[in-house]
Amino acid sequence: MLSRQFLMGRHREDLSATELAALEDAAASVTCYGAREEMVHHGDEVTHAMLLVEGFVCRYMDGLDGDRQLVALHVPGDFVDLHGFPLRKLDHDIASLTEVKVANYPHSALSQLILDHPNLGRMLWFSTLLDAAMHREWIFRLGRLGAIGRVAHFFAEIGRRLQMVDLSDGCSFPLPLHQSDLAEACGITAVHANRVLRELRERKIVTFKGGQVVVSDILALHAVAEFDDGYLYPSGH
Amino acid sequence: MLSRQFLMGRHREDLSATELAALEDAAASVTCYGAREEMVHHGDEVTHAMLLVEGFVCRYMDGLDGDRQLVALHVPGDFVDLHGFPLRKLDHDIASLTEVKVANYPHSALSQLILDHPNLGRMLWFSTLLDAAMHREWIFRLGRLGAIGRVAHFFAEIGRRLQMVDLSDGCSFPLPLHQSDLAEACGITAVHANRVLRELRERKIVTFKGGQVVVSDILALHAVAEFDDGYLYPSGH
DNA sequence: CGTATGATTGAAGGGTCTCAAAATAGGTGG
DNA sequence: CCACCTATTTTGAGACCCTTCAATCATACG
Protein backbone atom coordinates (compact mmCIF):
# COMPACT_ATOMS: atom_id res chain seq x y z
CA MET A 1 0.00 0.00 0.00
CA LEU A 2 2.44 2.59 -1.27
CA SER A 3 -0.06 5.41 -1.43
CA ARG A 4 -1.38 4.98 2.11
CA GLN A 5 0.17 8.11 3.55
CA PHE A 6 -0.47 10.09 0.40
CA LEU A 7 -4.17 9.47 0.81
CA MET A 8 -4.19 10.29 4.50
CA GLY A 9 -3.52 13.92 3.79
CA ARG A 10 -5.67 14.20 0.71
CA HIS A 11 -9.29 13.33 1.35
CA ARG A 12 -9.18 9.66 0.66
CA GLU A 13 -12.90 9.57 1.40
CA ASP A 14 -13.61 11.16 -1.98
CA LEU A 15 -12.26 8.16 -3.87
CA SER A 16 -13.87 4.85 -4.76
CA ALA A 17 -12.25 1.45 -4.20
CA THR A 18 -11.70 1.14 -7.95
CA GLU A 19 -9.90 4.43 -8.05
CA LEU A 20 -7.76 3.53 -5.08
CA ALA A 21 -6.72 0.29 -6.75
CA ALA A 22 -5.96 2.07 -10.02
CA LEU A 23 -3.73 4.56 -8.25
CA GLU A 24 -1.90 1.79 -6.51
CA ASP A 25 -1.39 -0.06 -9.79
CA ALA A 26 0.09 2.93 -11.55
CA ALA A 27 3.31 2.68 -9.57
CA ALA A 28 5.86 0.97 -11.77
CA SER A 29 8.77 0.54 -9.40
CA VAL A 30 10.42 1.59 -6.18
CA THR A 31 13.77 3.38 -5.99
CA CYS A 32 16.06 4.13 -3.07
CA TYR A 33 18.44 7.04 -2.69
CA GLY A 34 21.17 7.72 -0.17
CA ALA A 35 21.18 10.73 2.10
CA ARG A 36 22.06 14.12 0.58
CA GLU A 37 21.77 12.95 -3.01
CA GLU A 38 20.59 15.11 -5.86
CA MET A 39 17.48 13.42 -7.26
CA VAL A 40 16.42 15.83 -10.02
CA HIS A 41 18.39 18.68 -11.53
CA HIS A 42 16.59 21.77 -12.76
CA GLY A 43 16.03 21.77 -16.50
CA ASP A 44 16.01 17.98 -16.69
CA GLU A 45 13.18 16.35 -18.59
CA VAL A 46 11.04 14.50 -16.04
CA THR A 47 9.48 11.21 -17.14
CA HIS A 48 7.93 9.88 -13.95
CA ALA A 49 6.55 11.22 -10.71
CA MET A 50 8.02 10.14 -7.39
CA LEU A 51 5.84 9.44 -4.39
CA LEU A 52 7.89 9.66 -1.21
CA VAL A 53 7.41 6.51 0.82
CA GLU A 54 10.19 6.84 3.38
CA GLY A 55 12.56 9.63 4.35
CA PHE A 56 12.73 13.37 3.78
CA VAL A 57 13.31 15.30 0.58
CA CYS A 58 13.77 18.99 -0.15
CA ARG A 59 13.40 21.23 -3.17
CA TYR A 60 15.65 24.25 -3.53
CA MET A 61 16.95 26.97 -5.78
CA ASP A 62 20.47 28.30 -5.99
CA GLY A 63 21.50 31.93 -5.82
CA LEU A 64 24.46 33.43 -7.63
CA ASP A 65 26.96 33.15 -4.81
CA GLY A 66 26.19 29.52 -4.13
CA ASP A 67 23.58 30.17 -1.45
CA ARG A 68 20.55 27.91 -1.42
CA GLN A 69 16.93 28.66 -0.70
CA LEU A 70 14.67 25.75 0.16
CA VAL A 71 11.29 26.14 -1.52
CA ALA A 72 9.70 22.96 -0.21
CA LEU A 73 10.26 20.12 2.20
CA HIS A 74 8.61 16.77 1.61
CA VAL A 75 7.54 14.16 4.11
CA PRO A 76 6.35 10.59 3.48
CA GLY A 77 3.11 10.58 1.53
CA ASP A 78 4.06 13.58 -0.60
CA PHE A 79 4.49 13.49 -4.34
CA VAL A 80 7.86 15.12 -4.77
CA ASP A 81 7.68 16.13 -8.42
CA LEU A 82 4.14 15.52 -9.57
CA HIS A 83 4.18 19.06 -10.92
CA GLY A 84 6.76 17.77 -13.39
CA PHE A 85 3.94 15.86 -15.08
CA PRO A 86 2.27 18.92 -16.62
CA LEU A 87 5.42 21.06 -16.51
CA ARG A 88 7.70 18.44 -18.10
CA LYS A 89 10.81 20.24 -16.86
CA LEU A 90 11.49 21.55 -13.40
CA ASP A 91 12.63 25.03 -12.53
CA HIS A 92 14.47 23.87 -9.40
CA ASP A 93 16.52 21.02 -7.93
CA ILE A 94 15.38 18.15 -5.74
CA ALA A 95 17.59 16.34 -3.24
CA SER A 96 17.23 13.78 -0.50
CA LEU A 97 17.94 14.78 3.07
CA THR A 98 17.94 11.27 4.50
CA GLU A 99 17.99 7.84 2.95
CA VAL A 100 14.86 7.77 0.86
CA LYS A 101 12.48 5.33 -0.73
CA VAL A 102 10.21 6.51 -3.56
CA ALA A 103 7.54 4.87 -5.70
CA ASN A 104 7.75 5.79 -9.38
CA TYR A 105 4.66 6.70 -11.40
CA PRO A 106 5.52 6.97 -15.11
CA HIS A 107 3.90 9.97 -16.75
CA SER A 108 2.41 7.63 -19.34
CA ALA A 109 0.67 5.68 -16.58
CA LEU A 110 -0.60 8.90 -15.03
CA SER A 111 -2.04 10.03 -18.36
CA GLN A 112 -3.95 6.80 -18.66
CA LEU A 113 -5.01 6.95 -15.03
CA ILE A 114 -6.50 10.37 -15.53
CA LEU A 115 -8.31 9.36 -18.71
CA ASP A 116 -9.84 6.34 -16.99
CA HIS A 117 -10.56 8.08 -13.68
CA PRO A 118 -11.20 11.80 -14.04
CA ASN A 119 -11.88 11.97 -10.34
CA LEU A 120 -8.37 10.76 -9.62
CA GLY A 121 -7.00 13.31 -12.03
CA ARG A 122 -8.70 16.06 -10.09
CA MET A 123 -7.23 14.70 -6.91
CA LEU A 124 -3.70 14.66 -8.29
CA TRP A 125 -4.22 18.22 -9.47
CA PHE A 126 -5.42 19.07 -5.98
CA SER A 127 -2.27 17.57 -4.56
CA THR A 128 -0.02 19.85 -6.60
CA LEU A 129 -2.11 22.83 -5.54
CA LEU A 130 -1.61 21.88 -1.92
CA ASP A 131 2.09 22.38 -2.57
CA ALA A 132 1.27 25.76 -4.08
CA ALA A 133 -0.71 26.69 -0.96
CA MET A 134 2.34 25.84 1.12
CA HIS A 135 4.46 27.94 -1.19
CA ARG A 136 2.17 30.86 -0.48
CA GLU A 137 2.47 30.33 3.22
CA TRP A 138 6.24 30.26 2.86
CA ILE A 139 6.04 33.59 1.04
CA PHE A 140 4.05 34.97 3.92
CA ARG A 141 6.53 33.52 6.40
CA LEU A 142 9.51 35.11 4.67
CA GLY A 143 7.81 38.38 3.90
CA ARG A 144 6.09 39.17 7.17
CA LEU A 145 7.75 37.24 10.01
CA GLY A 146 11.03 37.84 11.81
CA ALA A 147 13.58 35.08 12.26
CA ILE A 148 11.91 33.57 15.32
CA GLY A 149 8.51 33.55 13.70
CA ARG A 150 9.92 31.95 10.57
CA VAL A 151 11.57 29.09 12.41
CA ALA A 152 8.51 28.61 14.61
CA HIS A 153 6.26 28.59 11.55
CA PHE A 154 8.46 26.05 9.83
CA PHE A 155 8.31 23.74 12.83
CA ALA A 156 4.58 24.22 13.15
CA GLU A 157 3.95 23.36 9.52
CA ILE A 158 6.14 20.29 9.39
CA GLY A 159 4.75 19.08 12.71
CA ARG A 160 1.22 19.40 11.47
CA ARG A 161 1.99 17.69 8.19
CA LEU A 162 3.74 14.80 9.91
CA GLN A 163 0.78 14.47 12.21
CA MET A 164 -1.47 14.04 9.18
CA VAL A 165 0.53 10.97 8.15
CA ASP A 166 0.91 9.56 11.65
CA LEU A 167 4.57 10.47 12.01
CA SER A 168 4.04 12.94 14.83
CA ASP A 169 2.07 12.69 18.03
CA GLY A 170 1.65 16.44 18.00
CA CYS A 171 4.45 17.30 20.38
CA SER A 172 7.48 15.43 19.07
CA PHE A 173 8.58 14.48 15.58
CA PRO A 174 11.66 13.71 13.49
CA LEU A 175 13.15 16.47 11.37
CA PRO A 176 16.49 15.30 9.99
CA LEU A 177 17.94 18.71 9.15
CA HIS A 178 21.10 20.55 10.06
CA GLN A 179 20.77 24.02 11.47
CA SER A 180 22.12 25.26 8.14
CA ASP A 181 19.23 23.54 6.32
CA LEU A 182 16.79 25.18 8.65
CA ALA A 183 18.46 28.48 7.88
CA GLU A 184 18.15 27.88 4.14
CA ALA A 185 14.45 27.18 4.57
CA CYS A 186 13.86 30.31 6.62
CA GLY A 187 15.99 32.80 4.70
CA ILE A 188 18.40 33.46 7.56
CA THR A 189 22.03 32.57 8.25
CA ALA A 190 23.02 29.38 10.04
CA VAL A 191 24.56 31.43 12.84
CA HIS A 192 21.34 33.28 13.41
CA ALA A 193 19.31 30.09 13.19
CA ASN A 194 21.37 28.85 16.09
CA ARG A 195 20.58 31.93 18.15
CA VAL A 196 16.90 31.66 17.31
CA LEU A 197 16.86 28.02 18.42
CA ARG A 198 18.46 29.03 21.70
CA GLU A 199 15.75 31.62 22.28
CA LEU A 200 12.96 29.17 21.44
CA ARG A 201 14.58 26.73 23.85
CA GLU A 202 15.00 29.30 26.62
CA ARG A 203 11.42 30.45 26.21
CA LYS A 204 10.41 26.80 26.65
CA ILE A 205 8.51 26.70 23.38
CA VAL A 206 10.36 24.12 21.31
CA THR A 207 13.71 22.32 21.17
CA PHE A 208 15.50 21.02 18.12
CA LYS A 209 18.38 18.62 18.61
CA GLY A 210 19.71 15.62 16.79
CA GLY A 211 17.11 15.79 14.05
CA GLN A 212 14.25 15.71 16.54
CA VAL A 213 11.77 18.47 17.33
CA VAL A 214 10.09 18.53 20.73
CA VAL A 215 7.30 21.05 21.14
CA SER A 216 6.70 21.98 24.77
CA ASP A 217 4.20 24.78 24.25
CA ILE A 218 2.28 24.42 21.04
CA LEU A 219 0.04 27.42 21.70
CA ALA A 220 3.06 29.66 22.11
CA LEU A 221 4.59 28.10 19.01
CA HIS A 222 1.54 28.84 16.92
CA ALA A 223 1.28 32.34 18.37
CA VAL A 224 4.88 33.21 17.57
CA ALA A 225 4.46 31.69 14.11
CA GLU A 226 1.05 33.25 13.42
CA PHE A 227 0.23 29.70 12.37
CA ASP A 228 -3.15 28.43 11.27
CA ASP A 229 -3.34 25.07 9.54
CA GLY A 230 -6.19 25.97 7.22
CA TYR A 231 -3.91 26.23 4.20
CA LEU A 232 -3.03 22.54 4.56
CA TYR A 233 -6.67 21.71 3.81
CA PRO A 234 -6.99 19.17 6.62
CA SER A 235 -9.85 16.69 6.20
CA GLY A 236 -13.29 18.17 6.35
CA HIS A 237 -12.12 20.77 3.81
CA MET B 1 -11.55 36.10 -28.09
CA LEU B 2 -11.44 36.28 -24.33
CA SER B 3 -8.68 33.73 -23.92
CA ARG B 4 -6.30 35.31 -26.42
CA GLN B 5 -3.79 36.58 -23.90
CA PHE B 6 -4.17 33.49 -21.73
CA LEU B 7 -3.01 31.37 -24.63
CA MET B 8 -0.13 33.63 -25.54
CA GLY B 9 1.71 32.71 -22.40
CA ARG B 10 0.75 29.07 -22.36
CA HIS B 11 1.84 27.22 -25.46
CA ARG B 12 -1.17 27.75 -27.59
CA GLU B 13 0.56 25.68 -30.28
CA ASP B 14 -0.20 22.50 -28.33
CA LEU B 15 -3.96 22.93 -28.77
CA SER B 16 -6.24 22.05 -31.67
CA ALA B 17 -8.81 24.40 -33.15
CA THR B 18 -11.58 22.34 -31.56
CA GLU B 19 -10.01 22.67 -28.16
CA LEU B 20 -9.53 26.41 -28.60
CA ALA B 21 -13.17 26.80 -29.47
CA ALA B 22 -14.28 24.68 -26.52
CA LEU B 23 -12.24 26.78 -24.15
CA GLU B 24 -13.72 29.93 -25.55
CA ASP B 25 -17.24 28.53 -25.19
CA ALA B 26 -16.80 27.62 -21.55
CA ALA B 27 -16.90 31.25 -20.49
CA ALA B 28 -20.36 31.96 -19.18
CA SER B 29 -20.22 35.68 -18.58
CA VAL B 30 -18.06 38.73 -18.10
CA THR B 31 -17.90 40.73 -14.87
CA CYS B 32 -16.36 44.10 -14.08
CA TYR B 33 -14.96 45.29 -10.76
CA GLY B 34 -13.90 48.70 -9.59
CA ALA B 35 -10.39 49.48 -8.44
CA ARG B 36 -9.30 48.20 -5.01
CA GLU B 37 -12.27 45.89 -4.56
CA GLU B 38 -12.11 42.58 -2.75
CA MET B 39 -13.05 39.91 -5.28
CA VAL B 40 -12.72 36.71 -3.23
CA HIS B 41 -12.41 36.33 0.51
CA HIS B 42 -10.39 33.47 1.95
CA GLY B 43 -12.54 30.56 3.05
CA ASP B 44 -15.27 31.37 0.54
CA GLU B 45 -16.59 28.55 -1.57
CA VAL B 46 -15.49 29.23 -5.15
CA THR B 47 -17.90 28.25 -7.92
CA HIS B 48 -16.28 29.66 -11.01
CA ALA B 49 -12.82 30.57 -12.25
CA MET B 50 -12.03 34.10 -13.36
CA LEU B 51 -9.86 34.80 -16.36
CA LEU B 52 -8.45 38.30 -16.18
CA VAL B 53 -9.19 40.14 -19.40
CA GLU B 54 -8.36 43.71 -18.43
CA GLY B 55 -6.66 45.30 -15.45
CA PHE B 56 -4.48 44.10 -12.59
CA VAL B 57 -5.36 41.84 -9.67
CA CYS B 58 -3.42 40.74 -6.61
CA ARG B 59 -3.63 37.89 -4.14
CA TYR B 60 -2.56 38.44 -0.57
CA MET B 61 -2.56 37.13 2.98
CA ASP B 62 -3.04 39.09 6.16
CA GLY B 63 -0.77 38.99 9.19
CA LEU B 64 -1.93 39.46 12.77
CA ASP B 65 -1.23 43.16 13.05
CA GLY B 66 -3.04 43.99 9.84
CA ASP B 67 0.01 43.83 7.61
CA ARG B 68 -0.46 42.33 4.17
CA GLN B 69 1.80 40.12 2.13
CA LEU B 70 1.13 39.87 -1.59
CA VAL B 71 1.55 36.30 -2.79
CA ALA B 72 0.75 36.87 -6.44
CA LEU B 73 0.08 39.60 -8.96
CA HIS B 74 -2.01 38.91 -12.03
CA VAL B 75 -1.89 40.52 -15.42
CA PRO B 76 -4.33 40.17 -18.33
CA GLY B 77 -4.38 36.60 -19.61
CA ASP B 78 -3.98 35.06 -16.15
CA PHE B 79 -6.54 32.86 -14.50
CA VAL B 80 -6.88 34.51 -11.12
CA ASP B 81 -8.39 31.66 -9.13
CA LEU B 82 -8.26 28.59 -11.31
CA HIS B 83 -6.67 26.80 -8.36
CA GLY B 84 -10.03 27.25 -6.66
CA PHE B 85 -11.41 24.63 -9.04
CA PRO B 86 -9.65 21.66 -7.42
CA LEU B 87 -9.23 23.37 -4.05
CA ARG B 88 -12.85 24.54 -3.77
CA LYS B 89 -11.93 27.08 -1.10
CA LEU B 90 -9.12 29.57 -1.13
CA ASP B 91 -6.55 30.08 1.59
CA HIS B 92 -6.08 33.75 0.73
CA ASP B 93 -7.85 36.87 -0.48
CA ILE B 94 -8.09 38.30 -3.98
CA ALA B 95 -8.55 41.96 -4.80
CA SER B 96 -8.48 44.20 -7.82
CA LEU B 97 -5.83 46.88 -8.10
CA THR B 98 -7.36 48.73 -11.04
CA GLU B 99 -10.72 48.57 -12.70
CA VAL B 100 -10.95 45.02 -13.91
CA LYS B 101 -12.80 42.90 -16.42
CA VAL B 102 -12.93 39.12 -15.93
CA ALA B 103 -14.46 36.23 -17.87
CA ASN B 104 -16.19 33.66 -15.68
CA TYR B 105 -15.71 29.94 -16.21
CA PRO B 106 -18.16 27.97 -14.04
CA HIS B 107 -16.52 24.97 -12.39
CA SER B 108 -19.23 22.77 -13.90
CA ALA B 109 -18.24 23.94 -17.38
CA LEU B 110 -14.58 23.28 -16.60
CA SER B 111 -15.37 19.76 -15.44
CA GLN B 112 -17.12 19.03 -18.70
CA LEU B 113 -14.37 20.72 -20.69
CA ILE B 114 -11.77 18.47 -19.12
CA LEU B 115 -13.80 15.33 -19.68
CA ASP B 116 -14.29 16.18 -23.36
CA HIS B 117 -10.75 17.48 -23.93
CA PRO B 118 -8.17 15.87 -21.66
CA ASN B 119 -5.49 17.84 -23.43
CA LEU B 120 -7.13 21.06 -22.33
CA GLY B 121 -7.33 19.74 -18.82
CA ARG B 122 -3.63 19.20 -18.78
CA MET B 123 -3.10 22.71 -20.02
CA LEU B 124 -5.26 24.23 -17.30
CA TRP B 125 -3.34 22.17 -14.75
CA PHE B 126 -0.13 23.48 -16.30
CA SER B 127 -1.43 27.00 -15.90
CA THR B 128 -1.92 26.61 -12.16
CA LEU B 129 1.57 25.14 -11.85
CA LEU B 130 2.98 28.16 -13.60
CA ASP B 131 1.60 30.14 -10.69
CA ALA B 132 3.30 27.71 -8.33
CA ALA B 133 6.60 28.23 -10.15
CA MET B 134 6.21 31.96 -9.64
CA HIS B 135 5.47 31.32 -5.97
CA ARG B 136 8.76 29.47 -5.72
CA GLU B 137 10.61 32.32 -7.33
CA TRP B 138 8.97 34.72 -4.87
CA ILE B 139 10.21 32.50 -2.04
CA PHE B 140 13.68 32.73 -3.48
CA ARG B 141 13.33 36.47 -3.87
CA LEU B 142 12.29 36.98 -0.27
CA GLY B 143 14.68 34.46 1.19
CA ARG B 144 17.89 35.27 -0.65
CA LEU B 145 17.73 38.82 -1.99
CA GLY B 146 18.11 42.15 -0.24
CA ALA B 147 15.55 44.91 -0.68
CA ILE B 148 17.02 46.21 -3.93
CA GLY B 149 17.22 42.76 -5.44
CA ARG B 150 13.64 42.03 -4.44
CA VAL B 151 12.22 45.14 -6.06
CA ALA B 152 14.36 44.62 -9.15
CA HIS B 153 13.23 41.02 -9.38
CA PHE B 154 9.62 42.00 -9.05
CA PHE B 155 9.95 44.53 -11.87
CA ALA B 156 11.82 42.02 -14.00
CA GLU B 157 9.17 39.36 -13.57
CA ILE B 158 6.19 41.59 -14.23
CA GLY B 159 7.92 43.16 -17.20
CA ARG B 160 8.63 39.79 -18.73
CA ARG B 161 5.11 38.54 -18.12
CA LEU B 162 3.56 41.64 -19.63
CA GLN B 163 5.83 41.24 -22.61
CA MET B 164 4.44 37.73 -23.14
CA VAL B 165 0.95 39.20 -23.55
CA ASP B 166 2.04 42.20 -25.62
CA LEU B 167 1.57 44.74 -22.86
CA SER B 168 5.23 45.66 -22.62
CA ASP B 169 7.76 46.53 -25.26
CA GLY B 170 10.50 45.27 -22.99
CA CYS B 171 11.58 48.59 -21.58
CA SER B 172 8.40 50.28 -20.43
CA PHE B 173 5.17 48.91 -19.02
CA PRO B 174 2.20 49.83 -16.80
CA LEU B 175 2.27 48.73 -13.17
CA PRO B 176 -0.60 50.42 -11.34
CA LEU B 177 0.72 49.98 -7.80
CA HIS B 178 1.43 52.31 -4.93
CA GLN B 179 4.84 52.14 -3.34
CA SER B 180 3.13 50.53 -0.36
CA ASP B 181 1.83 47.73 -2.61
CA LEU B 182 5.30 47.20 -3.96
CA ALA B 183 6.50 47.01 -0.38
CA GLU B 184 3.86 44.43 0.48
CA ALA B 185 4.95 42.33 -2.48
CA CYS B 186 8.61 42.51 -1.53
CA GLY B 187 8.38 42.04 2.21
CA ILE B 188 9.75 45.49 3.08
CA THR B 189 8.25 48.69 4.47
CA ALA B 190 6.84 51.39 2.25
CA VAL B 191 9.46 53.81 3.51
CA HIS B 192 12.25 51.50 2.54
CA ALA B 193 10.64 50.75 -0.81
CA ASN B 194 10.86 54.45 -1.49
CA ARG B 195 14.57 54.53 -0.70
CA VAL B 196 15.17 51.48 -2.89
CA LEU B 197 13.36 53.14 -5.79
CA ARG B 198 15.55 56.19 -5.36
CA GLU B 199 18.67 54.06 -5.56
CA LEU B 200 17.45 52.18 -8.63
CA ARG B 201 16.69 55.54 -10.21
CA GLU B 202 20.06 57.06 -9.29
CA ARG B 203 21.87 54.01 -10.60
CA LYS B 204 19.97 54.54 -13.85
CA ILE B 205 18.52 51.03 -13.86
CA VAL B 206 14.79 51.59 -13.64
CA THR B 207 12.27 54.26 -12.71
CA PHE B 208 8.81 53.78 -11.26
CA LYS B 209 6.42 56.68 -11.28
CA GLY B 210 2.72 57.13 -11.75
CA GLY B 211 2.07 53.45 -12.21
CA GLN B 212 4.57 53.19 -15.02
CA VAL B 213 7.88 51.32 -15.02
CA VAL B 214 10.65 52.42 -17.35
CA VAL B 215 13.64 50.13 -17.56
CA SER B 216 16.77 51.94 -18.72
CA ASP B 217 19.28 49.15 -18.20
CA ILE B 218 17.71 45.72 -18.39
CA LEU B 219 21.00 43.87 -18.02
CA ALA B 220 21.74 45.65 -14.78
CA LEU B 221 18.16 45.03 -13.65
CA HIS B 222 18.46 41.31 -14.26
CA ALA B 223 21.88 41.22 -12.63
CA VAL B 224 20.70 42.96 -9.47
CA ALA B 225 17.64 40.71 -9.40
CA GLU B 226 19.51 37.48 -10.22
CA PHE B 227 16.68 37.12 -12.72
CA ASP B 228 16.33 34.35 -15.27
CA ASP B 229 12.98 33.91 -16.99
CA GLY B 230 13.18 30.11 -17.25
CA TYR B 231 10.65 29.60 -14.48
CA LEU B 232 8.01 31.39 -16.57
CA TYR B 233 8.27 28.57 -19.11
CA PRO B 234 8.38 30.90 -22.12
CA SER B 235 7.42 29.26 -25.42
CA GLY B 236 9.78 26.60 -26.64
CA HIS B 237 9.61 25.05 -23.16
C1' DC C 1 43.29 9.26 19.24
C1' DG C 2 43.14 12.59 15.41
C1' DT C 3 40.25 14.58 12.17
C1' DA C 4 36.18 16.48 10.06
C1' DT C 5 31.77 18.27 10.60
C1' DG C 6 28.31 20.68 12.89
C1' DA C 7 26.95 23.57 16.91
C1' DT C 8 27.81 27.53 19.77
C1' DT C 9 29.37 31.98 21.20
C1' DG C 10 31.38 36.91 20.73
C1' DA C 11 32.05 41.42 18.67
C1' DA C 12 31.41 44.69 15.15
C1' DG C 13 29.11 46.41 11.11
C1' DG C 14 25.28 47.04 7.95
C1' DG C 15 20.61 46.86 6.32
C1' DT C 16 16.07 47.66 7.39
C1' DC C 17 12.53 49.40 10.57
C1' DT C 18 10.20 52.83 13.30
C1' DC C 19 8.62 57.20 14.24
C1' DA C 20 7.97 61.67 12.74
C1' DA C 21 7.78 65.44 9.68
C1' DA C 22 7.79 67.77 5.24
C1' DA C 23 6.91 67.91 0.35
C1' DT C 24 4.29 66.61 -3.59
C1' DA C 25 0.44 65.10 -6.28
C1' DG C 26 -4.39 64.40 -7.13
C1' DG C 27 -9.15 65.50 -6.68
C1' DT C 28 -13.08 68.54 -5.34
C1' DG C 29 -15.78 72.48 -4.68
C1' DG C 30 -16.05 77.27 -4.95
C1' DC D 1 -8.60 78.64 -12.24
C1' DC D 2 -7.61 78.74 -7.58
C1' DA D 3 -7.96 76.93 -2.77
C1' DC D 4 -8.32 73.31 -0.10
C1' DC D 5 -8.11 68.61 1.36
C1' DT D 6 -6.50 64.05 1.26
C1' DA D 7 -3.51 60.46 -0.20
C1' DT D 8 0.94 59.40 -1.46
C1' DT D 9 5.80 60.19 -1.79
C1' DT D 10 10.00 61.74 0.16
C1' DT D 11 13.44 62.66 3.67
C1' DG D 12 15.81 62.41 8.42
C1' DA D 13 17.47 60.33 12.73
C1' DG D 14 17.89 56.69 15.89
C1' DA D 15 17.07 51.93 17.24
C1' DC D 16 17.04 47.15 16.34
C1' DC D 17 17.58 42.85 13.96
C1' DC D 18 20.40 40.17 11.46
C1' DT D 19 24.86 39.36 9.13
C1' DT D 20 29.70 38.74 8.92
C1' DC D 21 33.91 37.04 10.42
C1' DA D 22 36.28 34.50 13.69
C1' DA D 23 37.17 31.49 17.29
C1' DT D 24 35.85 27.81 20.46
C1' DC D 25 33.35 23.76 21.67
C1' DA D 26 30.97 19.26 20.91
C1' DT D 27 30.25 15.16 18.44
C1' DA D 28 30.81 11.34 15.32
C1' DC D 29 33.80 8.56 12.83
C1' DG D 30 37.92 6.21 10.94
Image (cartoon, coloured by chain):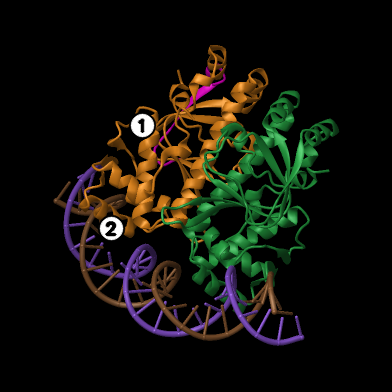
Chain colours: A orange, B green, C brown, D purple
Q: Chain of mark 2?
A: A
Give the magenta range.
A24-37
Is B212 situated above or below B109? below
The residue pinned by badge 2 equals: A195
- The local secondary structure at tag 2 comes to helix
Could you say where residue A71 lies in the image, as x and y percent from the top left? 49, 47
Is C8 situated above or below B148? above
Q: 10 Å neighbourhood of mark 2: few (<14), some, or many (≥20)?
A: few
Tally of numbered tags: 2
The residue pinned by badge 1 equals: A163
Q: Are marks 2 and 1 in contact (CB under 8 Å)?
A: no
- The local secondary structure at tag 1 comes to helix
Labels 2, 1: front one: 1
Q: Earlier in the sequence, mark 2 or mark 1?
A: 1
Could you say where residue D11 lies in the image, as x and y percent from the top left? 51, 83
Q: Amino acid at mark 2?
A: Arg
Could you say where residue B147 lies in the image, as x and y percent from the top left? 50, 66
Q: Does A55 sit left or right of B216 as displayed?
A: left
Q: Residue at x 55, y 38 (%)?
A: B44
Q: Residue at x 57, y 35 (%)?
A: B45
Q: 10 Å neighbourhood of mark 1: few (<14), some, or many (≥20)?
A: some
Q: Amino acid at mark 1?
A: Gln
Q: Is residue B99 visible?
A: yes
Rendering quarter of residue A211:
top left
Question: Where does the N terminus of chain A fall, quadrant-wise?
Answer: top left
